[in-house]
Image: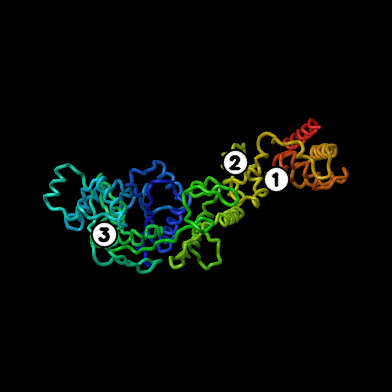
Amino acid sequence: MTSDVRVRFAPSPTGYFHVGGARTALYNWLFARHHGGQFVLRIEDTDRTRYVPDALPDLLDGLRWLGLFWDEGPEVGGDHGPYFQSDRLDLYLQYAQQLVDEGKAYRCYCSPERLDAMRDAQRAEGLSGYDRHCRYLTAAQVADYEAQGIRPVIRLAVPTEGETAFDDLFRGHIVVNNAELDDLVLLKSDGYPTYHLANVIDDHLMEISHILRGDEWLSTVPKHVLLYQAFGWQVPIQAHLPTILDPSGKGKLSKRKKKLADGRDMLTYVHEFKQAGYLPEAMVNFLALVGWSYDGETEFFSRPELIKRFELERVSKSPAAFSYDKLDHMNATYIRGLGANDLSGRLLPVLAESGAAADIDTTLALVPLVRERLRTLHDVVPLTDFVFGEAPSYDADLLLQKGMDRAATLGALRAAREALASAGRFDEATIEERLRGVPEALGLKLGAFLGVVRVAISGRKVSPPLFGTLAVMGREKVLARLAEAERLLEGAA
């Protein structure tokens, strides 16, 4: 393989950036980087009826978040632009007219009503496809339609006999009977091209060497091959990627919202994973493995390692399931591998977004206490929300530990408050030393005693490591929480 590799990712802004599209973009990007080639971003925005205005910003933000920066395309430019198909309409018209002039395409004047009636009749007979009514119009008939002011579409004159063949890197040699193909529309009556025409023209003019896309597009290749042949152009190398299945492995990972086995909503858009607290490096590593494997065993790859090792020969021909459990495991591993400063810098915006009055020093101090418990960055919020702001609200009975009545619990709270109030320092080691010495004098078990303190300061039975958390919160806040717990218990008596 040479540096002549040029690949493209060509999404339509008709919806938000799906993880299936993200994997396609990633494979194209890795393939280009592996071979020292070019990764082109092209926006196929000719479907104006389904255009979603904020889909493009969502796409660009998602690609940047994943670190899949493009060599040519929107906001970057390049020698093969424009990179929005809506800015290339004159090109499509020019090439469509060329095919008409050469007798390889024709104008079709059929009205929507005629086409609907034709399809109804065909369905009754078990047939499908355009009946080529306008393909054989006489000059007089064409003149009559033109005189009526009917705006035609342009259709490709597909051969009615013979075969069309092509090779796919994953699917092998594929042969299709031309009789099974329709005279596809190339240019619509509004002057906009169909996907087929614009795709072929742009891939040729942008000098795309390899087309890597989802296998749902495999059925379009014979039509595109015929177009390449009509223009006398070379067909790029085809590689249709395996389908991504949902976690059950029984159906395609769709955009419809479903529930995971643990009750969580199934995320499908890139921005949802970002908002949920997944790391971009974990997403890239995970997505690379949804259909590709280096040796069947290695799971964790840095970005440079992925670039070095990614080869199309290692892409599976079979569909691959999207495992959220594996992604969670991988994300948690990446979080644990972050340095304290890096992780605190990523946690601080998450805490701020939740409404917590967090600062960088407090967040940095919390990192060693929560790092091992984080599956996603957003897990930090329920783990630490009690550290910031006002005392949490909870039922007084939550303070009562096994084998302890109200009187014993009140005694534990007072003793803990006195021990911490008189401590010379308020660091983790001093707090631990002071509190561990309290329960024996009260005739309490250490676990039960610390359980009372934990509920008093956090409002819950489970929290990050207690001594370190108390040190982060500070003496004043901790003593106030213990005193509030005493009042709450006394008022509930």
Q: Can you identify the residue that label 1 sits on?
A: 463
Front residue of this view, candidates 119 and 449: 119
Q: How many marks?
A: 3
Residue positioned most to the left = 140
Quadrant (top left, top right, bottom left, bottom right) of the N terminus: bottom left
Where is 482 relative to 88, above or below?
Answer: above
Identify the residue at image location x=35%, y=51%: 42
Where is 313 relative to 57, above or below?
Answer: below
Dot 1 or dot 2: first in sequence order is 2
Q: Can you identify the residue that label 3 sits on?
A: 227
Give amino acid for label 3: Leu
Quadrant (top left, top right, bottom left, bottom right) of the C terminus: top right
| Alpha carbon separation for disc pair 1 and 3 | 64 Å
Give amino acid for label 2: Leu
- Residue 12 percent coordinates (x, y): 37, 49
Q: Identify the disc placed on residue 372.
A: none
| Alpha carbon separation for disc pair 1 and 2 | 17 Å
Identify the residue at image location x=37%, y=60%: 218
Give amino acid for label 1: Ser
Dot 3 or dot 2: first in sequence order is 3
Q: Would residue 447 be found to the left or right of residue 347 on screen? A: right
Where is 421 relative to 41, above or below?
Answer: above
| Alpha carbon separation for disc pair 3 and 2 | 54 Å
Q: Identify the disc placed on residue 351.
A: 2
Mark 3 element type: helix
Q: Are marks 1 and 2 in contact (CB under 8 Å)?
A: no
